[in-house]
Image (tube, rainbow, N blue to C red):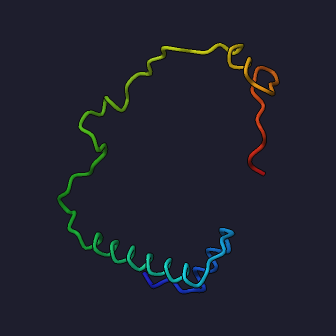
């Protein structure tokens, strides 16, 4: 892949609503170059006879264990401490527009 230009970095930063200084732009460009070098090294590896890794752990059952329900609060107990509630739900401030 080609190197990212300063204009490409600025375009991406603008789309993400970031403001970058010249130093930060050069740091991003340098880090991207290092990342591309690392990816090139990985692409050069011979993985022809390497078996796929589905789970990184030997014991898959440990990941898929049953939930152990041992303490459940009632709706009344939960709502007792809520400052705002409506229809058995806790009302919280809106955080996304």
Q: What is the residue that sits farthest to the left in this orientation? A: 49
Q: Residue at x 76, y 35 (%)?
A: 92
Q: Quadrant of residue 67?
A: top left
Residue shown at 46% from the left, 85% from the top: 3
Q: Is residue 47 above or below residue 3?
A: above
Q: Is residue 89 left or right of residue 44?
A: right
Identify the residue at image location x=20%, y=63%.
48
Q: How many marks?
A: 0
Image coordinates of residue 32 in percent, x first then y, are 45, 76
Along the line of sight, which residue is nearer the eye, 71 or 42?
A: 71
Relative to 49, say whether 62 is above or below.
above
Q: Residue at x 67, y 71 (%)?
A: 15
> Where on the picture, by quarter, is residue 6?
bottom right
Expressed as whole percent of the image width and height from the top left, the position of residue 74 reads 65, 13
Nearer-the-camera pick, 69 or 64: 69
For residue 24, which quarter of the picture?
bottom right
Quarter of the image for the N terminus: give it: bottom left
Q: Position of residue 14 (x, y in %)?
A: 67, 74
Relative height, residue 95 to residue 29 (above, below): above
Q: Is 58 displayed left or right of 38 in the figure?
A: left
């Amino acid at each position: 892949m080609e190197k990212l230009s300063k204009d490409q970095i600025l375009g991406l930063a603008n789309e993400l609503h970031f403001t970058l200084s010249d130093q930060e732009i050069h740091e991003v460009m340098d880090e991207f170059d290092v990342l591309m070098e690392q990816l090139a090294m990985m692409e050069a590896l011979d993985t022809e006879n390497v078996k796929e890794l589905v789970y990184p752990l030997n014991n898959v059952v440990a990941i898929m264990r049953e939930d152990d329900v041992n303490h459940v609060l009632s709706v009344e107990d939960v709502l007792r401490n809520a400052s705002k509630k409506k229809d058995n739900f806790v009302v919280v401030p809106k955080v996304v527009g």
